[in-house]
Image (tube, rainbow, N blue to C red):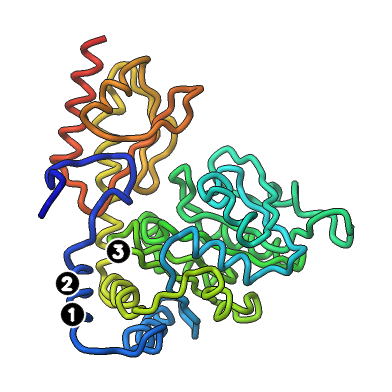
Amino acid sequence: MTLHDPTLRGFASDNYAGIHPEVLAAIAAANEGHQVAYGEDLYTTRLQDVMAEHFGRDVEAFCVFNGTGANVLALQSMLPPWGAVVCAETAHVNTDENGAPERVAGIKLLTVPTPDGRLTPELVDRQAWGWGDEHRAQPLVVSITQTTELGTCYTPEQVAAICAHAHERGMRVHMDGARIANAAASLDLPLRAFTTDVGVDVVSFGGTKNGALAAEAVVVLDPEASTGLTYLRKMNMQLASKMRFASAQLLALLEGDLWLRSASHANAMAQRLRDAVIDLPGVEVVRPVESNAVFAILPDGVADRLRERFRFYDWDEATGEVRWMCAFDTSESDVDAFAGALREELARR
């Protein structure tokens, strides 16, 4: 029984999309017979090799259910109880995880305002101080988001500068890669080019926003940067008993080019949307479109009326800024219909 309208499309989040058909087929293919539970299955074993191919060295990948779980686990494994994380003020770990890093992992977040969502060595230094001061949580990890919550991408050079700066100070670097595939597509680079090759220590690898269902992974690139994940994953209720289904999904994405095809398509649809609305009277596209997100400011009342037809979120109610997200299944006709509806609402003013 189908309870929803399968033709309905929204631009609120890439999480609104379903499972990619090729990923769904991989789940079905992995469903026959029995496999050992809790990650001792053939799919999870194979995933280690595939992750190593993408990240360019022997790695250890820990499947989890969601991005919040991946981030909390990764950071918890990288820090002692007195450690703190330097991150952008807009970072997902700070704004959208309901305090999970603080409440579940006991991690102090040291946030820095950024103009475009990206940290720099100079911005890191606003919070990277006070080592040895017993009165202050010790800044021991820098967490960057790729792509950022503002839709921007770090170049390999920008990541390398942060990693070198952090490592010189005895800090480690974590990358929240919920949309890491969109970054690779935008940069036209392999995953290792802006992770392993430039010094990132641990990655939260996102599958859900790229067409998977409850399939993410913590990928440890430097084993010296992380400890205890085997135990922390169970403690934090992120250990899947039937892990083969999470691993099979990530394999479906990563063994071929599905991960890149899907991300490239989502990015292209965002560019199409940007091009369709940027010259409309009263519409201001306020941020560069470097991935699958478009940020715009609309005239008063237009966003609320448009939302009656297409779901999307306010980004900053004070300025009227909204965010439109495209997904692997966003079509050209979806974009054109949305832009047409926006034109109609603008004409009603």
Q: How far apart are the alpha carbons under marks 2 and 3?
A: 11 Å
Q: Tell me the element at label 3.
A: loop
- The earlier-in-sequence mark between 2 and 3 is 2
3D distance between C-alphas at marks 3 and 1: 15 Å
Q: Position of residue 71 (x, y in %)?
A: 53, 62
Mark 1 surroundings: few (<14), some (14-19) or many (≥20) residues within 10 A: few
Q: Amino acid at mark 1?
A: Ala
Q: Residue at x 37, y 61 (%)?
A: 181
Q: Amino acid at mark 3?
A: Ala
Give the labeled residue for mark 3: 212
Q: Are marks 1 and 2 in contact (CB under 8 Å)?
A: yes
What SS does tag 2 mark? helix
* Relative side of 65 to 253, left or right: right
In which quadrant will I find the N terminus?
Answer: bottom left
Q: Can you name the residue that lies furthest to the top here?
A: 349
Residue at position x 84%, y 60% from top?
Answer: 131
* Above or below, 13 relative to 145: above
Position above or below: 92 against 53: above
Question: For the point 35% across and 88% down, which residue is it?
Answer: 41
